[in-house]
Image (cartoon, rainbow, N blue to C red):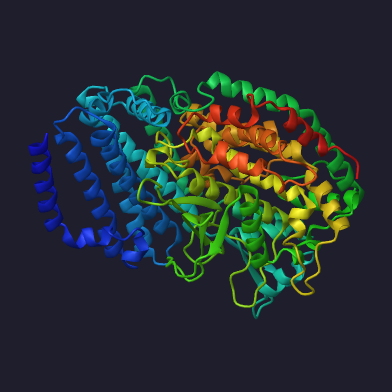
Amino acid sequence: MPRAAGRSRACLLALAAALLPGLAAAAELHAWEAGDSPAALRGWVEARLARASAAITELRAEQAPRSIENTLARYDEAYALIVEAQAQAQLMNGVSTQRELRDAGQALAQSASAALTALSLDREVYQALASIPQPADPATRHYLERALLEYRLAGVDRNAATRERIRTLQAQITERSLAFERAVHEDVRSVQVSAQELTGLPEDYLRAHPPDASGKVRLTSDPPDAYPPMKFADSAGVRRELYLASHAVGYPQNTATLKALLGARAELARLLGFASWPDYALRDQMLDTTAKVAGLIAEVDAATRTQAAREGEELLAFARTREAGLRRIDAADLRYWQEQYRRARFGFDSQSVRPYFPYAQVERGVIATAARVLHVEIRPAPQLRAWHSAVSTYEVFDHGRKLGALYLDMHPREGKDKWFSTWLVTAGRAGTLPDGALVCNFPGGAAGEPGLMDYMDVITFLHEFGHLMHHVIGGQQRFAGEGALGAGQGSLGIEGDFIEVPSQMLEEFFRDYQVVRGFARHYQTHASLPHGLFARMARAQAYGRAGDQQRQLMFTQLSLLMHTQGNGAESFDALYRRTFERYNTSAFVPGDHYWASFTHLTGYGSNYYAYVFDRVIALDFFARFDPRNPLGGDTGLRYRTLVLAPGSTRPAAQLVRDFLGRDANPEAYRRWLAAGTQPP
């Protein structure tokens, strides 16, 4: 009623006066625009949470019959403000060079997560949403149905004591997840080796790692430091040292953290009536039961196990020609021997293409490729302020209409998150465009350093950029909850086991010479990547796919077993080793504690299977593009329109059917695997 609405506005004016400094900070769309200090970040986050609380207060006070405008719109605004507060607090935790700001980001992310939990357990809001007459618009109807499902899965219909325990467990899950990730983020291991032990490494790597006065070189567990020696160093001792250092990150401190996290998740699932966390976590996914996931694992295992075993036998036979008497290849030596085998069998040395992939050219090339595939324009936007001078900024346009902004933080620095990931920055909705960020650790970044990238680095860049474009293109909805990317487990957004489809689909454009030739130029001579070298690279890249898929099954099973047996008598080390040995032809290396840095256990939880499931869909999608000219025609526009642009306004399975005209099938996946068996 108008009077009730008037009283609500008066309350908001009083609240605005009380929180004026904070509300001024909240007027900034991005946390870093409010200032580069813990106090500024705190003011920005708290002001957004206050605005979210005010929207919920208005929702509750509404006396008119429930409608999309007076109820769902207010709920969505509160949801968006909380999600952005959480996302940007976590972003500052991951990218800031100031430890104090990282501390504040972690604490404020927990506060925002608590607000999101409180909203998900608010029975009055749930009842208000449930009272809205069924919308005529299919997208809004799907959003409302999904929101009500997530409320029920959150436990909103449980008694007060149970809801309070749920609130406590959710807070513990958030706290322990952030602690697990922070331990990985800040744990940098190092080894000291002699300069003579680095034979086989590229010249630019050696220049970047000069010996000290004693002739020693310090190498760290950070990816740009650790990965090249494990692939190229002729010294087995160096390879093993770095492998163990990299696979010890987070250990042993994450042992207790993970145990507590798994315990809280298991208790929460039981409280909500599920036998295990995986049963609970699957309820709102495309594969919504553990039986379906088990079927996927069995199908992919059957398709890849024999081929992976043959790959392992061929690799060992080759290694024995170099090291007679070698009984088995250690996991620490796997990348090295694969590289040597690719050189011998395919005539391809992966160092030979690195000069054609300097970072700046790759950035331009990936952006240009995505723009052509998706029929958008991506322009540099130097006027946008970012959190660090190293961040590149862009804006995305569709026929002159701005769709959103991109922030690329792509090189390592002290205190920064060590992985490769895509971040929601702002949630798109009416009046607010979606912004997203890539936080990666590719070579380069220093003045005068070209940042020569391995071909797998380029594929990783394409992968992450696929996520970013999904967020921006799929975020053009009326409501934030209809966007592509949500806030994690139990949130709105597209089903979590569809998330990896757009990223893995964009990777596949690296197969096409015309696409790669457009940006692969020698950083000194500017010559294009020769077609013959590209062809050898493509054949070599296809080798080992079955073994890679087996390792993906290892991580899939590990994530499931950790959440069903992780608090049993078997230690995490024993559980990890058992799973490793089930899916790898290489030998386990004692002292490998990789599970302690496996942050997908906090992000995907038990649902890592999405990488395997989505590979099948992504390859089926890519098969629709013209193999002679994948950037030509209107397939990319159809893909953007039917798959990315809807965000989460319809079920993911429907998006698949809309684009393919049928459900996904594994035929393209089988052809992709078979390509790895073709002779050079």
Name the spot of residue 521 as percent of width and height, x first: 76, 66
The N terminus, quarter of image? top left
The C terminus, quarter of image? top right
Viewer-proximal residue, 447 or 185?
447
Name the spot of residue 412 as percent of width and height, x first: 55, 64
Q: Residue furthest front?
A: 399
- Residue beneath the point at 65% across and 30% down: 660
Judge whether 316 appears above or below 457 on screen: above
Judge whether 408 appears above or below 536 on screen: below
Q: Residue furthest bottom?
A: 213
- Residue beneath the point at 92% across and 48% down: 321
Judge whether 89 appears above or below 572 on screen: below
Name the spot of residue 281 as percent of width and height, x first: 45, 29
Relative placement, left or right, of 169 versus 63 is right
Relative placement, left or right, of 30 versus 620 is left
Say whether residue 475 is visible. yes
Name the spot of residue 440 as percent of width and height, x first: 56, 57
Relative placement, left or right, of 174 versus 78 is right
- Residue beneath the point at 51% across and 57% down: 400
Viewer-proximal residue, 258 or 523?
523
- Residue beneath the point at 12% across and 52% down: 13
Count numbered badges in the picture: 0
Kindly indicate the quadrant of the structure image that contains residue 246.
bottom right
Relative placement, left or right, of 113 versus 678 is left
Viewer-proximal residue, 670 or 601?
670
Say whether residue 575 is visible. no
